[in-house]
Amino acid sequence: MDRRQFLSTAAAVTTLASLPRDTFAQDLLDIPKKRVGLIGCGWYGKCDLLRLIQVAPVEVVSICDVDTQMRQGAADIIATRQKSGKQPRQFGDYREMLKEKDLDICLIGTPDHWHALTMIEAVRSGADVYAQKPISRDIVEGQAMVAAARKYDRVVQVGTQRRSTAHLIEAKQKVVEEGLLGTIGHAEVCCYYGMGRNATAENCPPPEYLDFDMWTGPAPKLPFNPVMHPRSWRMFKEFGNGIMGDMCIHMLDTVRWMLDLGWPTSVNSRGGTYVWTDATGNVPDTQVATFDFPELDVVWTHRAYGDAPDRDYPWAVFLYGDKGTLKASVNKYEFFPRGRREPTLTGAPKTEWDKYPEDQHEKDLEQHVAAANRAHQLDFLKAIQDRSKPVADIEQGHISTASCILANMSLELGRSLAWDPEKQQVIGDDEANSMLARDYRDGWEHPTVDNI
């Protein structure tokens, strides 16, 4: 059985993800203990790393963060979770950590504006990489990241773990691949979570434990605001891609994966800030985008206020066919044959608390996602073993990320953007193409395909 066959059933993925630490992996994957480093020790950096520790024989030897409190907190919990009981070395500059060239695996959980530089330096140092989504803040960064992974022959898995979510794999197989939807002509993706978009705070000096200049890195140097750090940096276009880049990428990527879609041919988006006009952040609180694929169109909607039209699916995928409808989210899926009000097929996520009781007490862990994250880490490890592409390979991450960035560009420019995937350019639009790479702050060099 090859890797892709191995991952082709939800049962196989679920079984692997639920193996206890003391019986996992060494025999099944025949891998030696991996030396691991983490760049970005905040919320999702820790979530990813602690799931990897649960399923694989690893030793976390190095961590890096510009926030000394966050870094020390991560070191403390790592020491309680890894078998050796050791605390990892601590760094404030990722370049110092990576120049040691002693890591087999590097996980990246930084804000979006840091993903490209850290990932490229990590693969250059010889590490395989697990990088959070969206992979980049601009499209040229993403192009350089794909090129770097190929140039240095490294496995790079992107944290779009819907592709490793057992109940969504089941939905893909039992509903989509079995043809229960019939001819699929339209897809909708959405998010109606507030996402902290209404947060307000006054600028102030950065805390002593935060190296704010290094935190800013290549991004524009703004006055420090408590909304920026931690986590709500996503509400600033200087550091992230907004709700579009944070939440749409997951569900758009899910549709692309379920339906085997490549690049959109064009992207159009409209929206703005209509409700939280006094909030500190500057990304849209309302946005609609249409992604035109050769096979069908996919429409995204987000509102950071009000209720979801379907309260059971506030962040979701809807696939519409002539024979039925599939509703899917991180919490469940339901298939409704045409004309039926009740689903005939359903699925839900697994918690696996019996095998991983620590999940129940881990601060900020999304309980419904933990098993999917473990399965995603296992897919990453299997790809490392085989030297093959993982299920969320960096190129797939680039397509989904760039599509969302194009939507943000379309909103800013006020027009549709036609995309040429071969040339990696917007067709016939010099102004849009000038926006594919943002300006870096003095002292930092923007990566390109030619300078990696």
Image: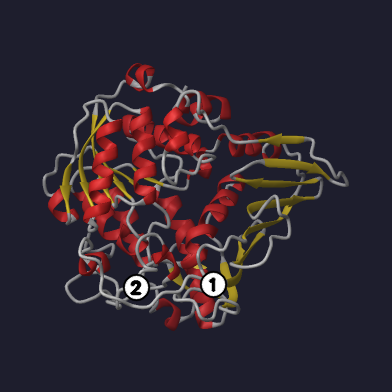
In the rendered image, which quarter contains the C terminus? Answer: bottom left
Q: Is residue 320 left or right of residue 358?
A: right
Instruction: Classify residue 358 by image quadrant.
Output: top left
Residue 2: % across, % down: 45, 26
Q: Nearer the viewer, residue 1 or 68?
A: 68
Location of mark 2 (residue): 225
Relative to 82, say whether 212 is above or below: below
Give the farthest residue toward the right: 339
Taking 329 as reference, is 185 above or below it?
Answer: below
Give coordinates of residue 340: x percent, y percent. Answer: 87, 44
Q: Residue at x 32, y 56 (%)?
A: 110
Identify the image's colour scheme: rainbow, by chain, secondary structure or one colour.
secondary structure
The image's mark for residue 301 is none
Tell me which amino acid carries mark 2: Asn
Q: Nearer the viewer, residue 155 or 246?
A: 246
Q: Are marks 1 and 2 in contact (CB under 8 Å)?
A: no
Residue 173's image quarter? Answer: top right
Please give the residue where the numbered disc 1 appears in the rendered image.
418
Please tell me whether mark 2 sits on a helix, a strand or a loop.
Answer: loop
Location of residue 301 in the rendering, given as x and y in whole percent from the top left corner: 63, 65
Q: Earlier in the sequence, mark 1 or mark 2?
A: 2
Query: Percent from the top left, x then y, of residue 1?
Result: 47, 21
Characterize the local packing of mark 2: few (<14), some (14-19) or many (20 or more) Cα atoms within 10 angstroms: some
Residue at 31% across, 55% down? 147
